[in-house]
Image (cartoon, helix red, strand yellow):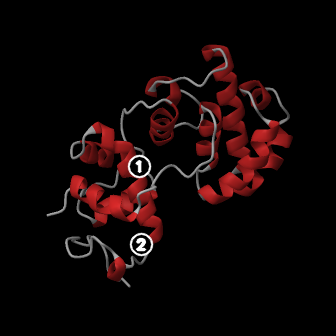
Amino acid sequence: MLTAGKVCSMLDKEYPKAEIALGHENPLELLIAVMLSAQCTDKRVNIVTKELFREYRKAEDYAYGSPEKLKRYIKSTGFYNTKAKNIQNACRIIIEKHSGKVPGTMEELTALPGVGRKTANIVLSNAFGRLEGMAIDTHMKRVNFRLGLTKNTDPVKIEQDLIKQLPNEKWNHYTYLIIEHGRAVCKAPTPSCSICVLEKECPKKGVLKSK
């Protein structure tokens, strides 16, 4: 029977360099990158932020800059009107309530416009080294369900299922192992089970067809 711990050990050999793919140099850049990544690939976000971060260096640059200018920079990430509005409003709150610094608690982060628990977990773990939970994205939902490690579809419930199976120092690393595996092998809608190192033990929950 597979456990999250066993999956972690097996995938660690396949993806020894698994880590966050979004380029960033500080908490603000990471927050902005994660907000832009909604319904967008990390690859596209990194292309956009390469130019964006040269122009926007502080929360003030986003908060008080031209909305139209920001939209032009981020347009290719999709939903740019909503993203620009959330980024500007979030940065205003960061300035007004947190002295221009990205806050470092779950409560403070999720109080920002456009920031949910997933985004907050990513920022906390990667920018501050604080492990309060696990970021549940589409890969984490799909792969863990197929592996039989959760029966839930709600991100909060999936998170609770997984954190019970792993020591907290493994939470962040496990997340990126699963994301790598989801992109490379356990894809939607058709996984490549024939080349999967977990194939012999995977219950393949919900899998109707595989390669």
Percent position of residue 35, x then y = 61, 43
Percent position of residue 202, x then y = 23, 70
For the residue pair 71 and 164, the one nearer the viewer reads as 164
Q: Is residue 128 left or right of residue 167?
A: right
Q: Which residue shows up at 68% across the image and 36% down it?
A: 87
Q: Which residue shows up at 22% across the image and 57% down it?
A: 6
Q: Can you say whether 123 is above or below 192 in the image?
A: above
Estimate how packed mark 1 is, as few (under 14), some (14 to 19) or many (20 or more) residues with alpha carbons within 10 Å.
Answer: many
Q: Which residue shows up at 67% across the image and 15% down it?
A: 96
Residue 205 lies in quadrant? bottom left
Q: Can you say whether 107 is above or below 162 in the image?
A: above
Q: Which residue shows up at 44% across the image and 58% down it?
A: 179
- Whether residues under marks 2 and 1 lie with C-beta atoms below 8 angstroms apart, the answer is no
For the residue pair 75 and 174, the one nearer the viewer reads as 174
Quarter of the picture containing the C terminus is: bottom left
The three-letter amino acid code for the residue at tag 1 is Ile
Residue 40 visible to an observer of this rendering: no
Residue 135 lies in quadrant? top left
Identify residue for label 1: 136
Quarter of the picture containing the N terminus is: bottom left
- Does dot 2 land on a helix, a strand or a loop? loop
Sooner in the amino-acid sequence: mark 2 or mark 1: 1
Q: How many marks?
A: 2
Q: CA distance from mark 2 to mark 1?
A: 18 Å
Identify residue for label 2: 185
Q: Nearer the viewer, mark 2 or mark 1?
A: 2
Q: Can you say whether 198 is above or below 126 in the image?
A: below
Residue farthest along the left direction in this orientation: 1
Percent position of residue 137, x then y = 45, 53
The three-letter amino acid code for the residue at tag 2 is Val
